[in-house]
Amino acid sequence: MHAVVSLFTTYLPYFILVLTLLVFVHEFGHYWVARRFGIHAEVFSIGFGPELIGWTDRRGTRWKISLIPLGGFVKFLGDSDGSSALPSDEALSADQRRHAFFSQPLYARAAVVLGGPLANLLFAVVLLTGVFYVAGEPYSPPVVAVQPDGPAAKAGLRSGDEIVRLDGRSVDRFEEIQQAQFLYLARPMSVEYRRGNTLRHGEIIPRYCERTDRYHNTVRYGDLGIDELIRPVVGGFTTDSPAQAAGLKVGDLLLSIDGKPVEYFSRIPDLIGDRAGQPLAVKYERAGQIHETTIVPQPDQVTDCSGATHTVGRMRIRAANVTEFRNHDVLGAAWAGVQHVWNMTTMFYTSMAQIVTGARPVDELGGPIRIAKAAGEASYAGWFGILNLVIGLSVVLGVFNLLPVPMLDGGHLAMYAYEGIRGRPLSLKAQELSLKIGFALIIGIALVATFNDVNAIKYVLR
């Protein structure tokens, strides 16, 4: 019951706040471009349904906030509705036709439609530029810790190697390795890595992995047997940590477990994995002095890539933050922002293509409950957490609307492309049919996402 109350008192307000901001940016993109071409906007609405509050500006545009906060629209002169999909049957004077959307040349209509998604993408770039200029760009070096007997180890890699290229793409940060694991599943990947001053080449055959995440969804990826090389420094503790109970503190450097050296943080599970409930001697360094204590790892259930369940030991500690920051001038920060948005865009489209082709399960699609929970959780991280969420969702909103599905901006652009190639628009009957198909697709996606939310609600709300 407490979780349900939290959904409406904590998560929902932040969800509405974030969504309202992003919808305004999107619709203002349409509106701003339309104004450049002299197109008159009759209504600018945040939300759907009955109007809650509103006003009419000196140009005759009605600005309003409506009851249902799940989107918005700009209705231009001559439109049949807020989707700008079809012209209305209303008779327009010669002067009105000059300011009506459907009376404009093809390039003007395409620019107006494109303005919304581009506004979301540009908004994300601007926010990232500000963050990277003020605080620096987060950066994790692509220096890896190689799991024993894993795919990378079989390809000849060792801990301490620096990945230079993976699958023909240059690697600048460890996050790009993680992205490759998520996107390319079990496809063999060429790898170029640096060991000392020597550049080496090989091929990694990822191990197909299928796990269940905390939302009870199936997550598929190609496991490379690679972790980020992180010093074994205690950065924090999770609930009921046996390590904390044994006297370890944040900042302690782990030296050995049961007499075996701890070379890097991800080595810890290998050293204690099969020792749940058994006392282990742990040697650590604090303020230049060597100490020793005894820790009894707590048992935990994990599922491996083959689907088998095992009991492993956990010390319940978190690694210290090892993220570096690159300082940029304004132009450098802007270019870094563009690169981050581009990476998020390509990741989105690749994931969607995999869902359509069946390579990735549809239960990875999330609906409003998960978005609301993400917004609420981001609020606990302060404005920085909310800012990261706004950036991510702004990119998703922009690129999703560019999908070539009727009813979405990308669907309109596809019809304009047809009109440009054939020299005439689709027939009115064909446009109406495509809009019905597009509406069915959008409703279908919404139903699948909502079903996933409802199916996993006990996991989302706990």
Image (cartoon, rainbow, N blue to C red):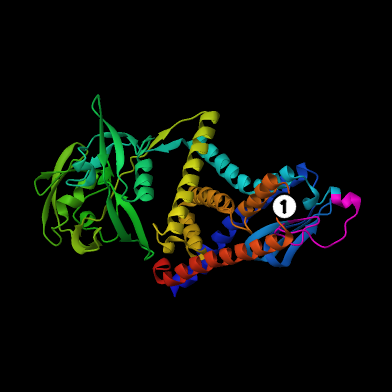
The residue that appears at 23% across and 42% down in the rendered structure is 152
Instruction: Tell which of 171 and 284 is nearer to you.
Output: 171
* Horizontal side of residue 254 vs 460, given as left or right: left
The residue that appears at 15% across and 50% down in the rendered structure is 271
Disc 1 target residue:
425
Magenta segment includes 93 = yes
The residue that appears at 54% across and 37% down in the rendered structure is 129
Residue 221 in sight in this render:
yes
Instruction: Tell which of 359 and 323 is nearer to you.
Output: 359
Report the number of numbered marks: 1
Mark 1 surroundings within 10 Å by alpha-carbon count, few (fewer than 14), some (14 through 19), many (20 or more)? some
Q: Is residue 162 above or below residue 380?
A: above
The residue that appears at 42% across and 66% down in the rendered structure is 460
Question: Which residue type does callout 1 highlight?
Answer: Pro
Instruction: Tell which of 354 and 221 is nearer to you.
Output: 354
Main SS class of the magenta portion in the image: loop
Instruction: Tell which of 294 and 85 is nearer to you.
Output: 85
The percent coordinates of residue 186 (x first, y second) are: 31, 50
Magenta segment includes 124 = no
Image quadrant in which the N terminus is located? bottom left
Q: Residue furthest front?
A: 422
Residue 25 in sight in this render:
no
The percent coordinates of residue 279 (x first, y second) are: 11, 57
Over which residues does the magenta segment extend?
Answer: 75-97
Q: Residue furthest left?
A: 259
The percent coordinates of residue 374 (x first, y second) are: 47, 58
Secondary structure state at the residue bearing disc 1:
loop
Q: Which image quarter: residue 208?
A: bottom left
Image quadrant in which the C terminus is located? bottom left
The percent coordinates of residue 304 (x first, y second) are: 24, 59
* Horizontal side of residue 24 vs 6, given as left or right: right
